[in-house]
Amino acid sequence: MKKHWSVLVASGALVVSFLGFPGMASATSGESVSIKGHPSGFHYEQHDMDGHQGVRAWCTKSNGGHYKALVICVRILNGEKIHREAGFWQSRGKDSIVWCPPETLSQDAGIMTKAS
């Protein structure tokens, strides 16, 4: 039994020496670390295409962040306001578009940003 225990301890030490301890960090990768920020140079406008109203938003500089279009729509029948946002986050140079639901009109446009 003593022999088995020493073999187990020796093999465990060997595994730790090759793999290291879990959670140990290494800072020798040589890659530069950059801080991500919110996009800048962003623009948005109300957009009308074939009778469908919505908002188109875009940014000229992403700074590592993302953005999406926002719209406030107003229901034609009762004036109810509906807030909508684009389904996907975009990065620099790509349009983010969100449409109003049927029987509504686009009232206000906006953009949402995040630093990631």
Image (cartoon, rainbow, N blue to C red):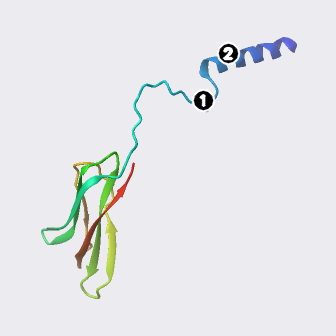
Q: Secondary structure at mark 2?
A: helix
Give the percent coordinates (x, y) of residue 92.
25, 48
Q: Secondary structure at mark 1?
A: loop
Mark 1: amino acid: Met
Would you name the residue on which mark 1 appears?
A: 24
Q: Nearer the viewer, mark 2 or mark 1?
A: 1
Mark 2: amino acid: Leu
34 to the left or right of 60? right
Q: Nearer the viewer, residue 56 or 25?
A: 25
CA separation in Å, label 2 and label 1? 17 Å
Q: Residue furthest left?
A: 50
Displayed quadrant of residue 30: top left
Displayed quadrant of residue 109: bottom left
Would you name the residue on which mark 2 appears?
A: 14
Residue ID at (41%, 35%)? 33
The answer to whether residue 70 is above or below residue 93 is below
The first of marks 2 and 1 along the sequence is 2
12 to the left or right of 48? right
- Quadrant holding the N terminus: top right
Give the percent coordinates (x, y) of residue 28.
49, 24
Give the percent coordinates (x, y) of residue 17.
64, 17
Residue ID at (31%, 52%)? 39
